[in-house]
Image (cartoon, rainbow, N blue to C red):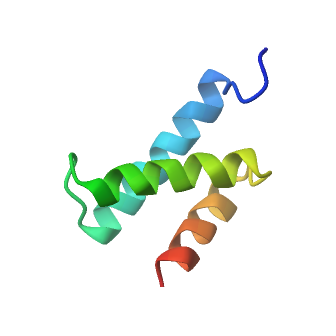
Amino acid sequence: MPIGALEPEDLNMCKRVFDHSCRELGLDGSSLENQLLASRILALFQSGIHDEQQLLAAVTARQN
């Protein structure tokens, strides 16, 4: 697997975190904030946060 590549289950988890965060923050599907959120989730995942609840907590903490 190439460096930086995500396994399907990892991508699914990041998508769940993204979807939950979008609902919580009221983000539109095409907004710039939405794109930034997706980038932030992937960066956090690649930095070593692989637990779904910890990832969600990290995203929420950065929004406050």
Apparent side of residue 36 relative to residue 48 in the rendered image (left or right): left
Apparent side of residue 57 relative to residue 33 in the rendered image (left or right): right
Relative height, residue 9 to residue 61 (above, below): above
At a point 79% along the width and 14% down the height, the residue shown is: 1
At a point 33% along the width and 54% down the height, the residue shown is: 34
Residue 23 falls in which quadrant of the image? bottom left
Relative height, residue 47 to residue 54 (above, below): above
Point out residue 18 in the picture as x, y percentages from the top left corner. 44, 51
Nearer the observer, 23 or 46: 46
Apparent side of residue 63 relative to residue 3 in the rendered image (left or right): left
Nearer the observer, 19 or 32: 32
Point out residue 6 in the picture as x, y percentages from the top left corner. 66, 27
At a point 42% along the width and 55% down the height, the residue shown is: 36
At a point 68% along the width and 48% down the height, the residue shown is: 45
Point out residue 2 in the picture as x, y percentages from the top left corner. 77, 17
Apparent side of residue 30 relative to residue 39 in the rendered image (left or right): left
In this view, which residue lies farthest toward the top?
1
Point out residue 52 in the picture as x, y percentages from the top left corner. 64, 53
Residue 61 falls in which quadrant of the image? bottom right
Nearer the observer, 52 or 42: 42
